[in-house]
Image (cartoon, helix red, strand yellow):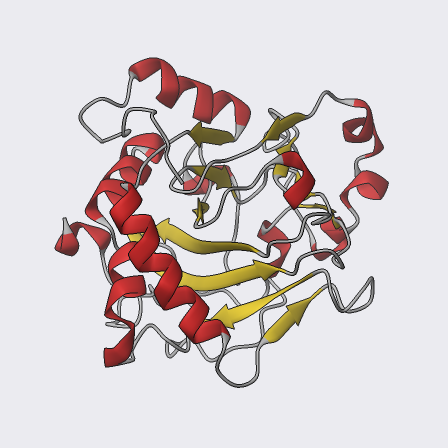
Amino acid sequence: MSNPAELTTPENLTDEAIAAFRANGFAHLPKVLTDEEVAECLRDAEEWLSRGQKMAWDKTVDPSVVDGTVMEWVDNPESAVLRRLALHPRITAIAEKLTGNKLRMFRSEIVRKPHDKSSVTPPHIDAPYWPWKSGADRGAYGASLTAWVALTDVPVERGCMSFVPGSHIGPEPTTDDWDIFTTRPELAWQPRIVVPLRAGGMTFHHERVVHMAGANLTQQDRVSLGTVYIDADTVFDPEYGTAEEDLGVQPGQRLDTERYPLVADFQ
């Protein structure tokens, strides 16, 4: 699990890295967690994955694409390790520097891509799922970004993610954009950046950037924690998104509840 790269921190995050995120729609940080933090978080994640019913993504494509647990552990006192990771001050402060916005934690999920039997995760963007407007009035960098932290090594053969740089810049997303290469076929011919990760490394990606992941062809599960951070002023708008969950606020209200804490309160 040794990763000799220097830890990225809010203090050593460069202006060039921030500019690259805003231009490309994603950022690759080779190491943000120590080996000790990785080991502790992986133990906790595997414990939660061993419990009960898990949700699966892309069942229409293949039920073994990826599975995991979503948010059920966040309010559980036994989940202190993973909650600390979702609100890790090193990660959240970097997220706020990348976006230039004050952020809340919206959602966090343990994600597993099973070994030796999973399929590809198709090209997609996240914005059509979320119940808020993702337009220019949300600021130059949208309403949300996702932090994807590798808790195991994720080489290309284990299903690492790829991104289409700059694809977050374009027309307002709609629910039709699940099949993004059909609604925006020009993107299928743009260069893609493949981002293998060592355990403890991570990516951030904008809600509107096209991303995908390969199949896990190895003999080890791919385990990660994905956390969505939103602009602190984001308001619930049921006209957008396909997420079927009770947010605990009324349409037009900010997601200003304990369920969606300001990350600055934990820094």
Residue drawn at x 37%, y 31% is 3
Residue 228 vertical position relative to residue 50 in the rendered view, above or below = above
Query: 29 or 130: nearer the eye?
Result: 29
Residue drawn at x 27%, y 30% is 7
Residue 264 seen by the camera: yes
Q: Quadrant of residue 185?
A: top right
Q: Does 118 sit left or right of 68 as displayed?
A: right
Residue 63 vertical position relative to residue 225 in the rendered view, above or below = below
Q: Does 97 sit left or right of 116 as displayed?
A: left
Q: Could you tell me residue 30's position as x and y percent?
A: 41, 29
Residue drawn at x 28%, y 38% is 96
Q: Quadrant of residue 139?
A: top left
Q: Could you tell me residue 227's position as x and y percent?
A: 41, 55
Residue 101 seen by the camera: no
Q: Quadrant of residue 193?
A: top right
Q: Could you tell me residue 210's position as x and y percent?
A: 65, 38
Residue 91 vertical position relative to residue 130 in the rendered view, above or below = above
